[in-house]
Image (cartoon, coloured by chain):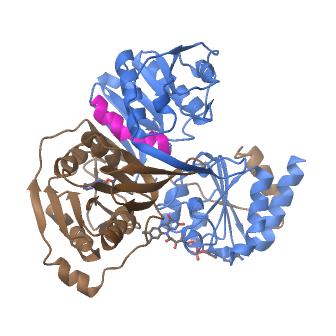
Chain colours: A blue, B brown
Amino acid sequence: MVLVYAESQDGKLKKSTAEAVTYGKKTAEVLGMDCAALVLGSVSDAGDLGKYGASAVHQITSDGLAHFDSQTYTQAIAKAAEQLGAKVVILSHSTTGKSLLGRLAVRLNAGSVSGVNSIPTNDGGTFKVNKNVFSGKALAEYAISSDIKVMTLSGNSLKPEESGAAISVSTMEVDPGTSRVRVTDVTLQKGDVAPLPEAELVVSAGRGMKGPENWTIIEELADSLGATTACSRPVADIGWRPHHEHVGQTGVAIKPNLYIAAGISGAIQHLAGVNSSKCIVVINKDPEAPFFKAADYGVCADLFEVVPKLTAAIRKAKA
Amino acid sequence: MKILVCITKTPETTAKIAFKDGDTAYDENGVQFIMNPYDEWYALVRACELKEAHGGTVTVINVGPATNDVIIRKALAIGADDAIRVDTEASSALYVAKQIAAQAAGYDLVLLGKESIDYNGSEVGGMVAELLGQPYISYATTLDVNGTTATVTRDIEGGTETAEIDFPLVVSAAKGMAEQRIPNMRGIMMAKRKPLNIVAADGSDVLVAVSKYTLPTGKTSVKMIDPDNMDELVRLLREEAKVI
Ligand SMILES: Cc1cc2nc3c(=O)[nH]c(=O)nc-3n(C[C@H](O)[C@H](O)[C@H](O)COP(=O)(O)OP(=O)(O)OC[C@H]3O[C@@H](n4cnc5c(N)ncnc54)[C@H](O)[C@@H]3O)c2cc1C
Ligand SMILES: Nc1ncnc2c1ncn2[C@@H]1O[C@H](COP(=O)(O)O)[C@@H](O)[C@H]1O
């Protein structure tokens, strides 16, 4: 069986779980198995995972799982995987999934690959799966030879597919142990746009903005699209923008459907974090800016003139 | 406080990526290697700062061949007291983690980078923690110590979380934990005399292996849009690229 750990937040499934379960279902088909989903804690819409192809949804509700701790969560998922006889365990490639992957690999004595982006193949019984390496500059095919396999699924790698209907949730009794992590504070950024790693539309700007006071035009462009904002590294380093917006090799790696970059030169370290985006629009006044080589659409002009025009065009098209 | 910092080497960030042996191995020919930025800028520097503030020792560990001694000496020049190199090829994340765990007895804190920028695995930290049976905080942006308790802030989706954990524990470092330090002349001279202990590897474990590399096909050439016709760009994004 293929077991998908479906992450939740505030008692609701995360958006990425639809992708993870769709991927689990397709992996299960390749292997001739069933796909089951696991939720931890109370999750009101857990049964919806049936729509994406889970033939069973299991839930562990234990006080020990009230807050995330890689140790207790690993214990819960590993015990569920053992009880259910899971051969493949799939996680989202989120901060949560990434901090569980290594632990689960050790616990289950499983071969692990992080950030996979293709449906596995199993020709001649050799399990193979792809992922990006060298910060998106190459693709590697991995062969996993262990009996049990663990993987995190890179976001935006496939479209969720509804193939079934909501199903009922069955409860499992598992003791996750006692957490040694005492959470003292959680601060969530306000606003209703998607956090950068999950965002499908991203508007980003760099040193060409001249100063932090000029960012209103970028925020308005993002607002017209419902996009999340990002920035190049120097801009975060000098404090024009918050650190969590920094994308690139040493920042967040993203692969949204649309990445609009204004006043960013397109240095190789910047490209490393964004070149998996489906569509890239570059706005730069320098026709020689390297970013144009990685772009789908380019506008060679002063961003201070073009960005407001683009915002107006989007608002007009949406009206 | 005894801190163990795991350091690895990665190709320099602008290095050309090419493959050999029928696209089954990374071609290191002509590639310059650096210390993985997360290990150097954040994990190692923060470890040195904690030592300076609270006393104790900082040991760096690398699993790899003798050619890695260059980056180990750099870590010693930045401020580590001594080093361990497990003399073997780093063939998989699990194999590396087992080598590190085998050397980690007696340390209060194991610090790693959040990921290596070549294979972007983010796996070794969790593996070491599980092998040691210790808590693991990943993607930490701040790390402070008060007696035998660590206070750690980490990035979570859409925000940050702060937690307290008693030693021993494993932490992976993300941007923000410290500022890059350039080794000075005195540090470089002292590094030459600091101990670098070479130890033999233990066991073998290859459950995963790369079977083939491919380079992504480049973008077909960019379509330039008239700056005075943003309606056209919006139309293309809608009808051609279908992304909005
Ligand atoms: C080890 C290492 C890791 C790194 N990691 C990252 C990383 O993760 N992410 C990252 O982004 N960088 C990273 N960098 C830095 C990277 O090399 C570049 O320095 C950086 O990306 C440049 O940022 P920028 O494009 O905003 O600024 P610049 O390179 O200064 O480019 C500004 C651009 O704005 C354009 N411009 C100026 N005015 C206007 C205007 N009015 N209208 C339109 N265009 C205008 C200019 O033509 C220019 O192309 C890293 C570097 C190193 C050495
Ligand atoms: N060969 C190695 N030797 C020592 N530490 C390593 C090695 N490989 C990875 N690490 C550590 O583990 C972290 C995460 O690496 P990875 O799981 O490969 O992304 C790195 O930032 C290093 O701190």
Nearest the viewer among A65 and A163 is: A65
The quarter in which the N terminus of chain B is drawn is: bottom left
Image position, residue B88 (x, y; %): 15, 53
- Residue A135 in sight: no
Image position, residue A263 (x, y; %): 66, 71
Left or right of residue B85: residue B217: right
Nearest the viewer among B75 and A25 is: B75
Left or right of residue B189: residue B212: right
- Residue B94 in sight: yes
Nearest the viewer among B166 and B93 is: B166
Residue in view at x 40 percent, y 28 percent: A176
User: The magenta stretch spans which residues?
Assistant: A95-114
The total number of labels drawn is: 0
Q: Is residue A301 above or below residue B156?
A: below
For the stretch drawn in magenta, the main secondary structure is helix
Residue in view at x 42 percent, y 15 percent: A33
Image position, residue A22 (x, y; %): 55, 26
Q: Residue furthest front?
A: B147
Image position, residue A294 (x, y; %): 57, 60
Residue in view at x 76 percent, y 51 percent: B236
